[in-house]
């Protein structure tokens, strides 16, 4: 059994892969927004979601990107995810 924390085990994604996957997501979302197929805004999770959100926003030509900070664990124990007010 490993004594490493889950985030230390490593699921590494290259910048190229992240960029490619973000563009693929944007292509799937294109034309499927709630307002005549268009999107007005994107919400990004600050724990790793900022870069993909910006790529998706650029691909969909969305100018409004909002952020949500979420704390989901303490170094010694896991818990429920909860939004943080920063």
Image (cartoon, helix red, strand yellow):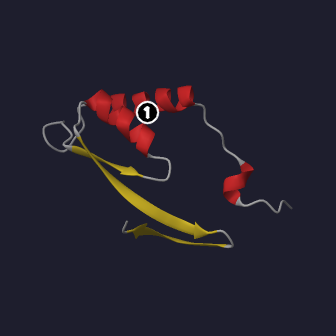
Residue 2 point in image, percent of width and height: 84, 59
**Would you place residue 22 above or below residue 35 in this image?**
above
Residue 79 point in image, percent of width and height: 57, 73
Look at the image and tell me whether residue 29 can be seen: no
**Would you place residue 74 above or below residue 6 in this image?**
below
- Report how many numbered discs are placed on residues in the image: 1
Question: Among all residues in the image, which is located at the extreme front?
Answer: 86
Which quadrant of the figure contains the C terminus?
bottom left
Residue 9 point in image, percent of width and height: 73, 51
Look at the image and tell me whether residue 58 can be seen: yes
Query: Relative to 24, is 14 on the left or the right?
Result: right
Residue 7, by quadrant, is: bottom right
Q: Residue at x 36, y 37 (%)?
A: 54
Q: Residue at x 23, y 30 (%)?
A: 61
Residue bearing mark 1: 22
Residue 41 point in image, percent of width and height: 23, 45
- Between 29 and 60, the one nearer to me in the picture: 60
Q: Residue at x 86, y 62 (%)?
A: 1
Mark 1 surroundings within 10 Å by alpha-carbon count, few (fewer than 14), some (14 through 19), many (20 or more) = many
Q: Secondary structure at mark 1?
A: helix
Residue 51, by quadrant, is: top left
Question: Among all residues in the image, which is located at the extreme right?
Answer: 1
Query: Relative to 15, is 77 on the left or the right?
Result: right
Query: Relative to 67, is 40 on the left or the right?
Result: left
- Between 22 and 48, the one nearer to me in the picture: 48
Q: Residue at x 30, y 30 (%)?
A: 58
């Amino acid at each position: 059994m490993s004594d490493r924390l889950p985030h230390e085990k490593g699921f590494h994604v290259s910048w190229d892969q992240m960029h490619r996957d973000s563009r693929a997501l944007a292509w799937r979302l294109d034309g499927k927004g709630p307002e005549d197929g268009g999107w007005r805004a994107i919400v990004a999770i600050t724990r790793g979601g900022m870069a993909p959100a910006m790529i998706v926003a650029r691909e969909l030509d969305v100018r409004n990107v909002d952020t949500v900070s979420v704390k989901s664990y303490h170094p010694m124990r896991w818990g429920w995810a909860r939004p943080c007010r920063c």
